[in-house]
Image: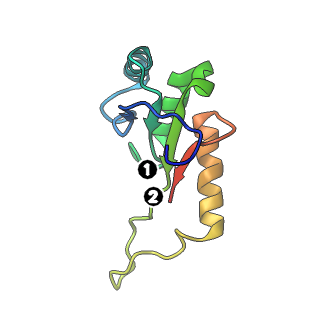
Amino acid sequence: MGSSDLQVSVVGLGCNNFGMRIGQDGANAVVDKAIELGVNFFDTAEMYAGEHGPSEEILGKALGDRRGDVIIATKFGMPTAMTPTGIQSPGSGTREYITNAVTNSLQRLGTAYIDLYMV
């Protein structure tokens, strides 16, 4: 990927439906098949499938002990709450917000590191 040492498969798997249309058992099957077919790049986000990162948690469980064989990309989302004047709530880009978002994503994914974190 770029000038890094990350070797990303030609096709990646977007995990936005994990926790919405696809539960844990289905996600396990999808991830197993994707890895079998050579996919090593998995994209998720804290806001996929609702608040508090259900997609991340499901992906982490589906990967299990194969974490070292894959590349995980995740991201944090901007709050959707609007103030009475129609301006988006501030604070989503603060150091504290991003640090908390990363920490929470690491816990949900069950990993010590994230390969690609998108802001």
Looking at the picture, which amino acid does disc 2 mark? Gly
Residue furthest toward the bottom? 85
* Residue 109, picture quadrant: top right
Identify which residue, 99 or 24, lies in the foreground.
Answer: 99
Position in image of residue 6 (x %, y %): 56, 38
Residue furthest toward the front? 3
- Is residue 52 among the parts visible in the rendering? no
Residue furthest toward the left? 21
* Residue 20, picture quadrant: top left
* Residue 43, picture quadrant: top left
Mark 1 and mark 2: Cα distance apart in space: 6 Å
Residue at 62% over, 19% down: 65
Q: Tell me: residue 115, above or below residue 23.
A: below
Residue at 37% over, 32% down: 10
The residue beneath circle 2 is 77
Q: Are marks 1 and 2 in contact (CB under 8 Å)?
A: yes
- Helix, strand or loop at mark 2: loop
The residue beneath circle 1 is 47
Q: Tell me: residue 99, above or below residue 103.
A: below
